[in-house]
Amino acid sequence: MLAVGFEEDVELILENLPPKRQSMLFSATMPSWVKKLSRKYLDNPLNIDLVGNQDEKLAEGIKLYAISTTATSKRTILSDLITVYAKGGKTIVFTQTKRDADEVSLALTSIIASEALHGDISQHQRERTLNGFRQGKFTVLVATDVAARGLDIPNVDLIIHYELPNDPETFVHRSGRTGRAGKEGTAILMFTSSQRRTVRSLERDVGCKFEFVSPPVVEDVLESSAEQVVATLNGVHPESVEFFTPTAQRLIEEKGTDALAAALAQLSGFSRPPSSRSLINHEQGWVTLQLTRDSAFSRGFMSARSVMGFLSDVYPTAADEIGKIHIIADDRGAVFDLPEEIAKELLNKQIPPGNTISKITKLPALQDDGPSSDNYGRFSSRDRFSRGGGSRFSRGGARGGARGGGSMDRRGFRSSRSWGSDDEDGFSSSRGGRSFRSGNNRGSRFSTSSDDDWLIGGSRSSRSSSRDSRSFGGACFNCGKSGHRASECPN
């Protein structure tokens, strides 16, 4: 708090304290600027280090998960993460900007009770918001890093890093809001494919290990929602139960257990069946299928071209409507997206011997699980995070970086904008246009460059067949217009 603008207030308080007193400064991390502050405000301070040289900088009870998302699917996935991992408990979602905090909170409100907390909120409203969160009047707090500094909120079950933090210290402070006083907690880091190496660097610098998981599937959300509804039923007053007992008995006689199931569905917010969701880019209305081939029947390695050819023979409609294709790491299979109804039709088709098509609930290891990152090197070895404080993170670096968009602070970390809002090539992150057709092969709508086959997003992606060509026939991921990529978008 001293580093982000409260120093004058603290000095005013200290001036009015008795000269003879004991003063203590607590900090989850001990960089050089904290040591400097301790020398300024404390008299011959005794350093008590409860961490020492341990590699792990977080409490033992915190489970760490990392989930790869796309910019367009983040908010949809966010509500599912809260439902499945918080299980009705308190959640703090950390954003980089005040605008994001407002927008994310507003988007969640229609599903889960939430409030925003940032620097533009008045002190009176801030206190009301925090008291409401502590008392359980709402369960999700969407906050910026600065606004959440110094908060002591007990029993926080889940922390979600909606955007990557600016530096390792911020990650430690964020995650440390849960798992306090020996209790267990969960912290989830959301990242895009271009940030994967940055996540690995964060693991090294903090001394932690993420479990990389897929976003919750529809079945997970339904199951968790039902469990939470059942838990709330225990809080219904017995006299209220007696009032509804005759109606309940009549419904059971008429419909049996279906009556109770319908009540659970309504209370869970699923009066209508939820639509399926892609495991690859998390878009609703799509299903992810896996094609595997027995080694005895396979000839050569699997490629996007072979998947398209296979589908053209089995069910041409599926080949026309296919979404993204990714090759499994062992080269003997592939995963791909199809619209929900077409996927159902394909699963009912007769499949040639030696091949298997199945609906999956979790992605296998893919060949493109480790793409390069423009952000690699942000946690360089010389700036590596340690409690010894060999590096410096100043107020000027934090604020200047966040506002400047592409500036570097004194430690070499980029601004928050460059961490969380990297433009992704429209070809690799959206289904783009459908104008590109390769030759006369009706089943292949992508480039004939075999090296890129596994990257192609099926019929809705496009790329020039020449590596040196700069032409782009798909739609921009940013503005939706054709003729340029998102990284070249004038908007």
Image: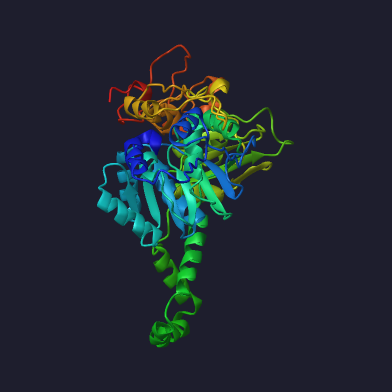
**In the depicted structure, whether residue 29 falls above or below residue 444:** below
Quadrant where the C terminus is found in the figure: top left
Q: Residue at x 41, y 62 (%)?
A: 270
Q: Quadrant of residue 394?
A: top left
x and y percent of residue 95 in the render?
39, 40
Q: How many marks?
A: 0
In-image side of 117 versus 452 (left or right):
left
Q: Nearer the viewer, residue 432 or 196?
A: 196
Q: Would you say residue 68 is visible in this rendering? A: no
Front position in the image: 104 or 305: 104
When asked about the image quadrant of residue 321, the answer is top left
Which residue is at the far right? 296
Question: Left or right of 432: which side holds 38?
Answer: right
Please provide percent x and percent y for residue 194: 48, 29
| Left or right of 346, for residue 245 | left
Q: Quadrant of the N terminus?
A: top left
Taking the spot 35% from the left edge, 36% from the top edge, the residue there is 7
